[in-house]
Amino acid sequence: MIKIAIEINNMTGVVKDLLNETTAIWNTYPPMVSSQVIFLAKCTEFQSALDSAIINTKIITSDKVAKRKAIENFMHPIIVGLKLFAKANPTIELIYDYDISISGVRKLSGAAFKVLYDNVRTDCTDNLTGLATFNITQQMLTDLDALIGPYEAIFSKTQLQIDKGKLARQNLKDFIKSFRAFLSDDLDVAAEYFLTINPEFYDAYVSAREINDIGSHGGILRGVVAEAITGIGLKGINVKLQETGIISKTNHLGLFYFPKLDAGSYTLQISKKGYKDYIVWNIPVMEHKITVKNISLIKEKASISFPIGSTISVAAGATVNNPLSLLGGTPNPSFLLTATGAQMKVSMSLLTGVHDANLFKIINPGDPLNVSLLEMGQAGSTNMVITNMGTVAGTLKVQQGILELIP
């Protein structure tokens, strides 16, 4: 609990620094101003609750972790030496086989770690002469004992101290819950005002909120899942990190993030009913860095149709771009377009708003023209780009087949 509180405290420090540096940006928005005042007050209360938990338990989690890590690092070459000694002296029976890596040592529980330490001390004491060949000396054992003493002393507490510690930690736990609720329901909501009017500030704010002492915990991968056509963030999308199996669900803005990642290359898999599955390969994540990967989802099929006889209007000299998918009962469905009022240029392209230079048709005023997918390019969901090349308004009338608009 104290470790979590320390991480939150580190994060709030980064947010406070950011707000201090960007006062000119947010101080014109009253909800952000009032939230910032409450935020500073709660930061002071949070620090007090954290200090109380640390003082009453006499345990500083970061110090405990540091002490154990120091013992693990110091003991590692001794374990390696014992393993080599056992291999070179098969007739000598050791208490432990020492076939354990440094990462394996770090995963041991407190009790199992103490057993390992006791075995190391016993085997080293019993075989100290032979272990000299593997650079294990009495001084090393003395230094190891000097490290283990303060670590074990952390757990030597009276019942009264333990009870006080439990109460302080419970108070801290309750405050963490209420503080997080304030951050997500108040300060974060106020900051969302800047998502469109000052995206640089909002991005910096989100990064600060997600840091949680990033310097000690690897990298962060985050981004926004949005609808491809509208660009609106999608809520409740499951974004899966394939290498770890962890799933992040997008919030109401479409935001997702994966904190505390080891440096390496990652794969994101996104699935949502009604949209095409999406996979992103080889996303690089670096230590102490934030990687941003935004994703656009394409709808599996359209939901609004242009029935026979409907029209698409284009103002004089204007271009319209409608995301379309052609539906019909034959392998090559087609539709008949009749232009009135002005000459029209029609093209289908996978690029929004861009005519395909090799696949377009010119329709003169009043002339019917049959346009098929085989003529216009790739079948399926695409973009229909229409330009009115005249000086008066024009329409295209659907005469055969069905055009389905993707909203």
Image: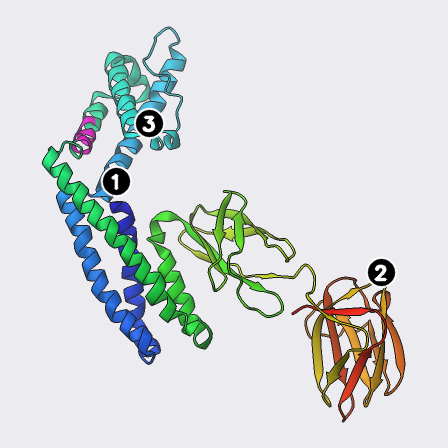
Counting from the top left corner in percent of width and height, residue 246 is at 48, 45
Looking at this view, is 66 or 328 the one in front? 328
Q: Earlier in the sequence, mark 3 or mark 2?
A: 3
Distance in Å between CA atoms under marks 3 and 2: 73 Å
Residue at mark 1: 66
Distance in Å between CA atoms under marks 3 and 1: 18 Å
Residue at mark 3: 77
Q: Earlier in the sequence, mark 2 or mark 1?
A: 1
Highlighted range, magenta:
145-152
Observer able to see residue 163: yes
When the figure is inspected, residue 67 is found, relative to residue 380, above or below; the finding is above
Picture quarter with the C terminus: bottom right
Residue at mark 2: 329
When the figure is inspected, residue 123 is found, relative to residue 298, above or below; the finding is above
The residue positioned 14% from the left and 31% from the top of the image is 156
Looking at this view, is 150 or 50 the one in front? 50
Q: Residues within 10 Å of mark 2 (few under 14, many from 20)?
A: few
Looking at this view, is 317 or 71 the one in front? 317
* The furthest residue to the bottom: 391
Counting from the top left corner in percent of width and height, residue 186 is at 33, 66
Element class at badge 2: loop
Q: Is residue 248 left or right of residue 299?
A: left
The residue positioned 87% from the left and 60% from the top of the image is 330
Distance in Å between CA atoms under marks 2 and 1: 69 Å
Magenta stretch: helix, strand or loop mostly: helix
Element class at badge 3: helix
